[in-house]
Amino acid sequence: MLRKGRSRIQLKSPAEIEKMRAAGRVVARTLDLLRESVRPGISTLELDAIAERSIREAGAVPSFKGYHGFPGSICASVNEEVVHGIPRADKILADGDIISIDCGAILDGWHGDSAITVAVGSVSAEDRTVMEVCEEAMWQGIAQLRPGNRLGDIGRAIEAYIVSRGRFGNVREYGGHGIGTEMHMEPHVLNYTQTSRGIRLVEGMCLAIEPMVNLGTRHVNVLEDGWTVVTQDGRRSAHFEHSVAVTADGPLVLTAREENREKIAEMGFPDPGF
């Protein structure tokens, strides 16, 4: 453990990082399956059932199910829902929607956590843009996960990219986190610039990097269900996430999917083994 004040940051050995990659592959395959399953007319509860079956058939356990009472195996957040949307039978996807799907799995005691935002049928140009901005902001944040950099460099890079693309809302109330033998661990990872650059990144740290970007303002509310986070202005939001290890060779994307292969090569990151 790396100690900072009262915080304890879990450092992983190369063998433990490989176990986290195995958990990440379960999440990656499940998200690929969910992307293929998204279509007009399907409910978010049906997507949840697909996810749970995929995770359990891989010998893993859904991280989210029962977590502080959360009822689903995925978070399914549609349109103005930013994160933590509860899967429901009456939440039916329609052409033109966008849906953020956040998925976690535990395999042999190690966690994987990743999220994608998916277009349902044909979506507007501005919806495509907010999805592209959010995903690229995530990659810019991931690029900072190198030994010797600081925790605050991640949020600085994420915010700088979002600002460079125009007037988008960068949600501040939620952020990334450490991950390992628990889903949420120290440190908390901000998606914006802070005064202090924070602790130094070292080999063996594993962090989930997850910006949330709104078409309107950054401000959000939580619905009466106690979980679902929505934009205050009712405009749409995108969310992307990968779990990543800090290694001597650079950021190792633990939840990498096949569709990320070209991007990982372009960014010069280590090959995670697809």
Image (tube, rainbow, N blue to C red):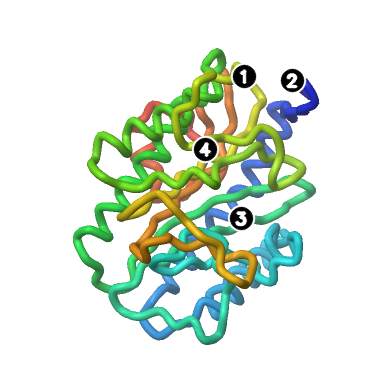
Q: Nearer the viewer, mark 2 or mark 4?
A: 2
Is disc 4 placed on a helix, strand or loop? strand
Inter-mark Cα distance, 2 to 3: 32 Å
Query: Where residue 234 appears, x then y in whole percent?
Result: 37, 66
Q: Amino acid at mark 1?
A: Ile
Callouts 2 and 1 close, C-beta under 8 Å: yes
Residues 215 and 150: in front is 215
Nearer-N-terminus badge (2/4): 2
Q: Amino acid at mark 2?
A: Lys
Disc 4 residue crowd, few under 14, some 14–19, many 20+, Cα 10 Å:
many
Q: Amino acid at mark 4?
A: Val
Q: Which residue is mark 1?
A: 199
Is disc 2 placed on a helix, strand or loop? strand
Which residue sits at x=51%, y=76%? 44
Which residue sits at x=35%, y=62%? 236
Q: Amino acid at mark 3?
A: Val
Q: Residue 253, which numbered label? A: 4
Res 249 seen here: no
Nearer-N-terminus badge (2/1): 2
Callouts 1 and 4 close, C-beta under 8 Å: no
Q: Which residue is mark 2?
A: 4
Is disc 3 placed on a helix, strand or loop? helix
Nearer-N-terminus badge (3/4): 3
Left or right: 129 as drawn, with respect to 92: left
Q: Residue 26, which numbered label? A: 3
Nearer-N-terminus badge (3/1): 3
Disc 1 residue crowd, few under 14, some 14–19, many 20+, Cα 10 Å:
some
